Amino acid sequence: MSLIVQKYGGTSVGDIDRIKNVAQRVKETYEAGNQLIVVVSARSGVTNELVARARELDPNPNEREMDMLMSVGEQETIALTAMALHAIGVPAVSRTGMQAGIMTDPAHTRARITEISGGDLKEQLDAGKVVILAGFQGHSNDGQITTLGRGGSDLSAIAIAAAVEADLCQIYTDVDGVYTADPRVVADAIKLDSISYEEMLELASAGSKVMQNRAVEFAQKYNIIFEVRSSFNNNPGTIVKEEAASMEDVVVSGVAIDKNQAKIVVSDLPDRPGTAAKLFQALGAAGISVDMIVQNIGREGKANLTFTVAREDISRAQKAVTESFPDEAAGKLFEASDIAKVSVVGVGMRSHSGVAARLFQALAEDGVNIQLVSTSEIKISVGIEPDDAEKAARVIHIAFKLNK
Ligand code: ADP
Ligand code: ASP
Ligand code: MG
């Protein structure tokens, strides 16, 4: 008998027939003699719809109330999934994040898990029940509902697998696994048999939403090996695990696109030591993460700084910048525009040279203009016009022979 954690994402529980399909799959695993914790997301589209409703009332809604609202979607699907199992003769019981003792810090809408007590989870499993756990939600130590950041049901699954020391952790989604690029954008993308935590983390952080980046970070920290696979067929998925020696032979493992970025230009800043520190401290204090950064050469005592942030952070960034440079704010200090980020990721970059040149050449040949560049040891990202993003992903995919 094994203890298995399965997570089903939004599309997999998107309607009644799909919930029945999930129940059938769970039944098979249960009847094979395993204990099961099933983590479910909200039906696809539900969380977005709730967020949109909140914004109709208030463009900057209170974050505690946002968590109260957003956690509703998962509460619907845990109950329906439990009922679907009852209907086919499988004993099952639903649990909210709070009931399962998923404790977080109080950072509403982006809370971090601090501890998992499990509540009565073990007792329920030992009594022969399948436990259906609400993804995406936890509670702070003053009893408030918190959520774990968008896509956070992945994190719920990995974290509960770590807490109960599960034998197997499976992330069921609407594609067969992790591909060399989003298969909905690059038609000839190839499914990877395995990928290292580090590469998966870079891809997730660069916009591949197949896994939440914080979930991958957690898995790496606690060495939770997991599999990403489809809930619609029985094809083997992608194993995400510690790097193996052979992985370095592949220069680039995947391409990621993030179309939700904004480029911010802050102009006419005083060109002296401490300016950048002051600016980025202000952004950091506002909880905004900055990605690519370019500083222009100063002229006549003035300099411009260009950087990228998530598009939803533009207004908070503007507030932070204008408040920290009040004297300059009267001028044309702050300009934001949409930008897309396209990244190539691969642990092989550590030992192979010429990756940037190949990337830039491929984009040049296709007439894609590069506005910003940033690199890490195993990643190169370029900031480009959003309309060029999908085309860029396709040409890069070919340039690095990822379809072979
Ligand atoms: P779930 O609701 O199951 O959590 P998501 O919609 O969050 O599913 O993530 C799955 C989607 O991620 C896929 O439908 C696919 O379009 C997208 N995706 C982006 N990059 C990749 C990639 N490299 N490999 C597989 N899927 C990807
Ligand atoms: N329902 C949440 C979201 O849409 C969590 C998840 O699906 O993983 O972000
Ligand atoms: Mg997801």
Image (cartoon, rainbow, N blue to C red):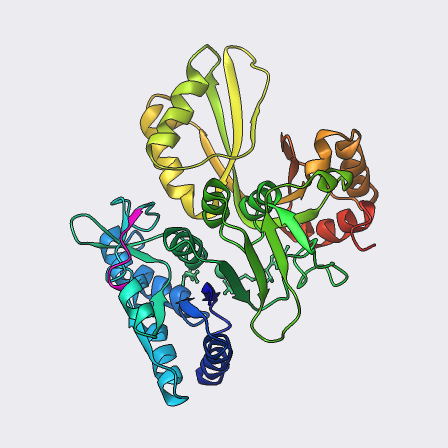
392 to 281, vertically: above or below: below
193 to 269, vertically: above or below: below
Where does the magenta region start and end? 115-121
- Residue 236's spot in the image, x, y percent? 65, 66
Q: Is residue 304 left or right of residue 147?
A: right
- Residue 356's spot in the image, x, y percent? 75, 33
Query: Which of these two is toward me, 176 or 69?
Result: 176
Quadrant containing the C terminus in the rendered view: bottom right
Q: Is residue 17 left or right of residue 58?
A: right
Q: Quadrant of residue 158?
A: bottom left
User: Is residue 119 covered in magenta?
Assistant: yes
Q: Residue at x 38, y 89 (%)?
A: 87
Q: Residue at x 43, y 48 (%)?
A: 312
- Residue 42's spot in the image, x, y percent? 40, 69
Query: Which of these two is toward me, 132 or 280?
Result: 132
**Count of labels in the image:** 0
Query: Which of these two is toward me, 302 or 290?
Result: 290
Q: Residue furthest front?
A: 1
In which quadrant of this rendering is ligand 1 seen? bottom right
- Residue 326's spot in the image, x, y percent? 32, 24
Q: Is residue 403 left or right of residue 167?
A: right
Query: Which of these two is toward me, 70 or 283?
Result: 70
Q: Residue at x 26, y 51 (%)?
A: 63
* Residue 402 in view: yes
User: Is residue 392 covered in magenta?
Assistant: no
* Residue 210 in view: no
Q: Residue furthest left?
A: 142
